Amino acid sequence: MDTGKTDQIIDKHEGQASSLIQILLEIQSEYHWLPKEALERVSEKLHVPFSRVRHIATFYKAFSLVPKGRHEIHICMGTACHVRGATRILDKVQDLTGIQPGETDLDFKFSLETVNCLGCCAMGPVLEIDGQTHGKLSPAKTADVLKSFE
């Protein structure tokens, strides 16, 4: 972990403890997870107890204490997507990446998660990669989407 980059992020927020969540979001964006060393550095520089920093990092689902892939895949499993074939989309993604929901591939290229709703019910089935939504998917279209991230 590059403590210099972590320090830059903290310094950008003038070391304000009130910016803790934003600092953690930016660190996660940089590393794709929150390494323990980064949490310790945040605690030290913000003068916030490590237990408090760790509590925030574990409370919010947006944070991860394990390494994530460069590309995060979220597959909607809500009712509208489910009845339109979301399980086939999930199966295709699992076949192509070799990972299950909650896992990251060995190359740290992809992480896979299922979600209850992405708010795009009319476009179902839907998957989101790095915040970009892809809808009205078939297994073949899903393969094309994943190929574009190679």
Image (cartoon, rainbow, N blue to C red):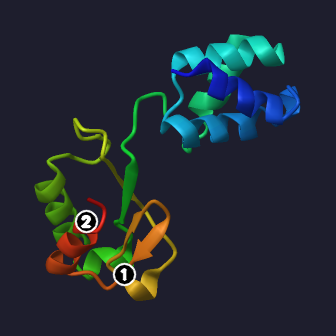
Give the residue at x 85% y 26%.
17
In percent of width and height, residue 32 lies at 48, 39
Q: Regarding mark 2 in the picture, which secondary structure is present there?
A: helix
Task: Count numbered badges in the picture.
Answer: 2
In percent of width and height, residue 85 lies at 22, 77
Give the residue at x 43% y 88%.
122
Provide the residue designation for mark 2: 146
Q: How crowded is mark 2: few (under 14 residues within 10 Å), some or many (20 or more)?
A: some
Q: What residue type is labelled 1?
A: Gly
Q: Which tag, 1 or 2, sits closer to the chain's start? A: 1
* 15 up-or-down from 36: above or below: below
Quarter of the rendering occupied by the C terminus: bottom left
Quadrant position of residue 125: bottom left
Q: Relative to 16, is 54 on the left or the right?
A: left
Residue 45 in view: yes
Task: For marks 1 and 2, give the one nearer the viewer.
Answer: 2
Provide the residue designation for mark 1: 135
* 150 up-or-down from 11: above or below: below
Q: Relative to 87, is 123 on the left or the right?
A: right
Quadrant position of residue 9: top right
In percent of width and height, residue 22 lies at 74, 41
Q: Regarding mark 1 in the picture, which secondary structure is present there?
A: loop
Cβ atoms at labels 1 and 2 below 8 Å apart: no
* 145 up-or-down from 94: above or below: below
Quadrant position of residue 82: bottom left
Residue lying at the far left of the rendered structure: 95
Cα–Cα span, label 1 and label 2: 13 Å
Residue lying at the far bottom of the rendered structure: 122
Q: Which amino acid does label 2 sit on?
A: Leu
* 32 up-or-down from 53: above or below: below
- Disc number for residue 65: none
**In this view of the protein, which residue sits in the foreground, 26 or 55?**
26
